[in-house]
Image (spheres, grey):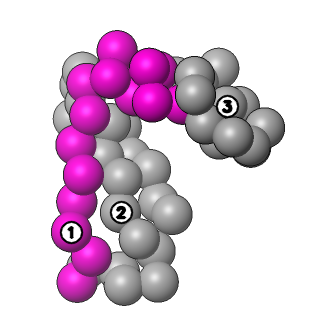
Amino acid sequence: MEVTTTVPGWIGLRDSKLGDASPLLAFTLSEWRAMLAVAPCRAARRLIRQL
């Protein structure tokens, strides 16, 4: 999984195994935080604090 914050106000997510062929999912910061708040693993929840 690759996460990017190159566009202000948006979080981009794609499958790193597919690279440029991967679809890009785009989230607002509030959507991203809401999704990760219910994530089952600590590594995903740690991403909340990084943004």
**Which residue corresponds to the image point at 45% horizontal and 30% vertical from the top-left?**
35
- Identify the residue position indicated by label 3 in the image: 45
* Amino acid, disc 3: Arg
Position of residue 7 measured from the top left corner of the image (x, y, whole percent): 21, 35
Query: CA gap, disc 1 to disc 2?
Result: 6 Å
Q: Is residue 33 magenta?
A: yes
**Disc 3 crowd, CA 10 A, few/some/many (<14, 14-19, 20+):** some
Q: Residue at x 21, y 69 (%)?
A: 23
Instruction: Please determine whether, in this image, residue 31 is positioned above or below residue 3.
Output: above
Q: Which mark is residue 50?
A: none
Q: Amino acid at mark 1?
A: Pro
Residue at 22% x, 60% y is 24
The answer to which quarter of the image holds residue 5 is top left
N-terminal label among 1 and 3: 1
| Residue that numbered label 1 is attached to | 23
Q: Which residues are magenta?
A: 21-36
Instruction: Please state the horizontal and vertical placement of residue 6, each as a whole percent of the image.
Output: 29, 40
> Residue 47 placed where, x, y %?
61, 33
Mark 1 crowdedness (10 Å alpha carbons): few <14, some 14-19, many ≥20:
few
Q: Residue 8, relative to residue 42: is it above or below? A: above
Residue underneath mark 2: 14
Count numbered badges in the picture.
3
Q: Nearer the viewer, residue 44 or 4?
A: 44
Inspect the magenta stretch and tell me whether residue 4 lies in it.
no
Mark 2 lies on a secondary structure that is strand
Identify the amino acid type marked 2: Arg
> Could one spot residue 16 in this view of the protein?
yes
